[in-house]
Image (spheres, rainbow, N blue to C red):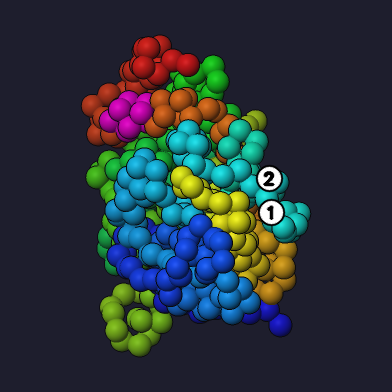
Amino acid sequence: MKKSLLYTAAASVLLVPLAACNSAETGNDGNGGNSTDTVTVWTYPVHEEYESELKESIAEFEDANPDIKIEYEILSWAEGEQKFDIALNTGSPPDLYFGKALGKYKETQLLVELDDKLNIDLADYDDVALDHMRIEGSLYGLPLYQYLHVWGGNKALLEEYGIDYEKIQNEGWTWDEFYELANIGEQTNDNGDRQYGFVFQGVDEELLDHLARNNGLPYRMTEDGIAWTDERILEAMEFIIKLREEGIMPNETAAIDAAKRNEMFYNHQALIYGRAIPYSEPSAEKRNEDIRNGDIDGEEIEFVLLPTPHNEGQEEVARGGAEGYLLFTQKGATEEHIGNSVKVLEHLAGADAIGQASSALALPIVHKQAAADYDLPLSELNERAAQRLAGKVLPPNNINSELAAKDDMFNTQVVVPTFQALMNGETTPEQALEKFKTEAESAQFKP
């Protein structure tokens, strides 16, 4: 029988920063030798019960390896990355850090390549998840989970309008098919409130990113430079404006954040919405339970996991990636200590750890044994849809760290403000494209 884990509203942990700090028993000598070796781990509140699971996992490891002690710290999502960057830049990172494999980490020469150090069979891990822990072909970490960004639908409304959501889950859909169906949802709901066919947060550029990926632009930056400079990104922007101008999306989309997006979905003001995650289903069910118990007011809702539509003739792409534990070293660290750190890494990103985290977060399980041992808190239809979409996640963009930094800067300095101006009606798709073209040719963004 598979293990099934139940947690309360764990999905919000991915979005809302939490602060926590603790540590296991501290050893004596981080550099090995005859004394106990201490391996330091910095991580995050991956889900609501993660720290308690981590404590149990550490105790299990230390019982089996009495010469190794693990000291851990739970960082806050809000400040943890900055704290880690400071430690890394001063040459004193922890041995293991939970995060993404980034080129800037490799540039410090403190990130440790794992290809010749692991004692496990990498064939047990999902290939795409492993790829997201690689930089320029070399492996620097092991994944704990594969995150997945999806769209969602209101099951009752989808069924009321005769929309075959199972077919969409199984086969995907085009922009034109999405437009036709979302157009049905633009009306007044049973409470007398305005109901929209589609609601998406507009305070960031994520909607444009979702549609660009599904219009032949899988990556914004390539080795040749910024790719968002042709008709494909223009088509994506024109499609978004069409949805807004025809009332399928709210006119005030530019001001809608994640909390407002969720509120509108729960209030039955959205037939389809984004961005969602697979855990949106158990999160909605927890809310339904609170309504039934009289703890909150509201109307129950069922979540249907949907893919992002793709433009006709283009490949369907899902937005996602992997996060896990990365191995770092410090000045004077011995090979024995590095080897002990590898043992801890393999344990903290092993089958049980992956199964527990994936089950808690309702994310596709990236380890064969974990997939056999653990269940996801999803309906059969939504789990099947999530697994299909996991296979649509692109490999990481293998541009070098310099180009990655330019891509981040282009997104922050150009894309986000330009898209906000577009959603506010202050510029047109054509003008936005010209802005992208002009900035892409500037020295600060060219390869």
Q: Residues within 10 Å of mark 1 (few under 14, many from 20)?
A: some
Q: Quadrant of residue 352?
A: bottom right
Question: In the rendered picture of this protein, how many numbered marks are placed on residues?
Answer: 2
- Give the CA separation, mark 2 to mark 1: 7 Å
Name the one closer to the observer, 281 or 47.
Answer: 47
Residue at position x 46%, y 45% in the image = 331
Q: Is residue 285 above or below residue 293?
A: above
List x then y, in percent, for residue 322. Answer: 55, 51
- SS at mark 1? loop
Residue at position x 53%, y 27% in the image = 400
In the picture, measured across the screen, residue 203 lies left or right of residue 273, that is: left
Q: Is residue 394 above or below residue 157?
A: above
Residue under pointer 1:
118
In the image, what residue type sits under mark 2?
Answer: Asp
In the picture, measured across the screen, residue 257 lies left or right of residue 142, that is: left
Residues tagged 2 and 1 counted as in contact (Cβ below 8 A) = yes
List x then y, in percent, for residue 31. Answer: 51, 57
Q: Quadrant of residue 440?
A: top left
List x then y, in percent, for residue 306. Answer: 55, 54
If the image is split into quadrants, where does the N terminus sit? bottom right
Magenta range is 409-417
Examine the structure image and report whether residue 413 is included in the region drawn in magenta. yes
List x then y, in percent, for residue 217. Answer: 55, 29
Which secondary structure class fits the magenta region best? helix
The answer to whether residue 151 is seen in the rendering is: no
